[in-house]
Image (cartoon, rainbow, N blue to C red):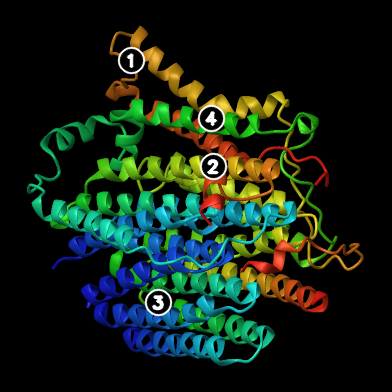
Amino acid sequence: MTSPTLYALTGAALIGIGFYGLIEAQHLLRRVITFNLIGSGLFVFLGAVGARNDGFDPIPQALIITGIVVALSASALAVGLVVAHSRASGRATFPEEDEDA
Amino acid sequence: MTLIFDAMLCALTLGVALATVLGCGVFRTIVFFVVYGLLLSVAWVRLDAVDVALAEAAIGAGLTGVLFLAAFGKLTRIGVEAEPSPKRFHLPAALGCIGLSGAMAWAWFALPEPHRPTPDLSDALPRAGVENPVTAVLLNFRAWDTLLEGTVLLAALIGLWILTRDEDWHHRLGRLQHVRSGGVMESFGRLLPPVGTLVGVYLIYIGADQPGGAFQGGTVLAAVGLIAALAGLLRPPRITECSWRMALVAGPLVFLGAGVAGEVFGVGFLTLPGSIAEGAIFIIEVALGLSIAVTLALLVIGPPEGGDSE
Amino acid sequence: MADFATYLFTGVGLFFFVAGSVGFLRFPDVFSRLHALTKADNLGLGFITLGTAFQAEAWRDAALLALIWGLVLLAAGTVSQLISRDALRERDEK
Amino acid sequence: MTAWLTLMAVGLLVSLGAALVRVWHGPDRADRMIGVQLAGTSGVAVLVLLAPVEGWVALNVALILALFAALAAVGFVKSASTDGGGDPEEGEDPVEPRPVGRNADG
């Protein structure tokens, strides 16, 4: 077991955790956050691929840096939509879930 | 010993991620997500990716926290009811997600052995004009990606501004920030930005040779600007202000200009010949760093909200 | 000699961090927890930066360590003041 | 030396992990924010300890974490203030009763 393997497995587990959170989430802010968890799990996996065999691969790193910044901008847009939705409807969940409950 | 450290860090990261997902209450989720970002920036250093760690430190530990906490505050002021009900544990969903993780783990062991650094890349690096291979990839070899990425940021900001209510359009972005004059928050807002600006500019400057560059420095500058804005010392602009709009598009515009120049001089669109690559990359980095900083700061500040109309 | 100083100071630093965490877990109310944490951790970080500075190869790194500690002190002072004010107000409103 | 510094870093992570139990239990929001502060300080300390092992460039990451150690907490007190843009130190701020939803979740 080497360190990159450890981080790759962590990344894989983070993706699973994030997906579970996304499926379970009802509050919209929680959805945005769990979606970010999936994304960063993928970044960790990709970063571990770049670090295999004591290597230093700049291409995954460059992709991850742009990915992190884009993830932040997408989250900001999503959060803006959540706030606008809540302002219009008075709730931070989608209507179909309220019918379920 | 380092393996024990890695194992501990991974275990802690997974524990915090689980707490983010399973904890009741959105506030607890946000707090654990900020802690998660902090741990991740340590993990990037261990994965030999200092460039990524620099960006993650400014974004994960700073900007996302402010973004989600501010949104949480807005939702509670709107009067949104608390998160519905403690959730039941869904076994099928959990099993499916475990299967997904298992598939990813299998993919890791099934991946072919890499040849590193790839022969093409090690041939090309001396012609890139910069010492830092990550900067070389970002601004020279894969310049297309980076140019489009700058455009995506701009698109996200425009999308966010579209959500503005009509009556707020001519107000300043975000909420009106006010602090006690001479208070702790104001002093903090005066002390930190000079140091932070220095660090951000330094990161952009050294990006050619060492870990750093437009993205890393830009995120640092964005967080610095956010601190100054929260302390009420830097008033956010209005959407209609022309100079700020220029700052938003400066990076993509300069980048595009360099790309067109490459086409005109017959080396191909977005191709930087080795002789001028160093200077061109530096100019692009400065412009792009500025644009990233302004765009990210304005994205976190959010659309204009007028006074206290809620 | 320099190695010995590193062993000593980083060890002391870790002790303060552990003490801060124990206080954070065990103290009865939010204000004493805040106190345990900001005091103990910043002292701990001070010792750790001091211990690591003995390994520094250049003055630049030692100066950077001092700057890092100073920034964390500034942040901790600000945050403890703001959070305790907020907690006070929250308590008054209950 | 490398082994010792790494051991110290492991100790810091254990200490942080124990403190996160308090963040899980709360009970106040302030407790959770103090936990974020603790995680920030611990992260800086871990990176400082790793600097001689991983290369001194890790200090740049520690520097950025130190710069923004207070940012989340400042954002928190801002969003917890009455109008979302205030400062808990403003004594003369007119305190209005807050919407009910606020204390129900956290």
| Circle 1 residue | B269
- To which quarter of the image does residue D96 belong? bottom right
Q: Are marks 4 and 2 on the same chain?
A: no
Of residue B89 and residue A57, the one placed in the foreground of this image is B89
**Is label 2 or label 1 in front?**
2
Judged left or right of residue B73, residue D56 is left
State yes or no: discs 1 and 3 in contact (Cβ < 8 Å): no
Q: Is residue A72 above or below residue B69?
A: above
> Callout 2: 10 Å neighbours few (<14), some, many (20+)?
some
> Callout 3: 10 Å neighbours few (<14), some, many (20+)?
many
Q: Are marks 2 and 1 on the same chain?
A: no
State yes or no: discs 4 and 1 in contact (Cβ < 8 Å): no
Q: Amino acid at mark 3?
A: Thr
Q: Mark 1 to mark 3: distance in Å?
A: 48 Å
Q: Amino acid at mark 2?
A: Ala
Judged left or right of residue C25, residue C57 is left
State yes or no: discs 3 and 4 in contact (Cβ < 8 Å): no
Q: Amino acid at mark 4?
A: Leu
- To which quarter of the image does residue B66 belong? bottom right
| Circle 2 residue | A78
Q: Residue at x 76, y 29 (%)?
A: B166
Q: Chain of mark 3?
A: C
Judged left or right of residue A79, residue B95 is left
> Callout 4: 10 Å neighbours few (<14), some, many (20+)?
many
| Circle 4 residue | B154
Q: Chain of mark 4?
A: B
> Callout 1: 10 Å neighbours few (<14), some, many (20+)?
some
Of residue D68 and residue B160, the one placed in the foreground of this image is B160
**Residue A88: image location, x then y, percent:** 69, 40
Q: Under tag 1, what secondary structure?
A: loop
| Circle 3 residue | C52
Q: Mark 2 to mark 1: distance in Å?
A: 34 Å
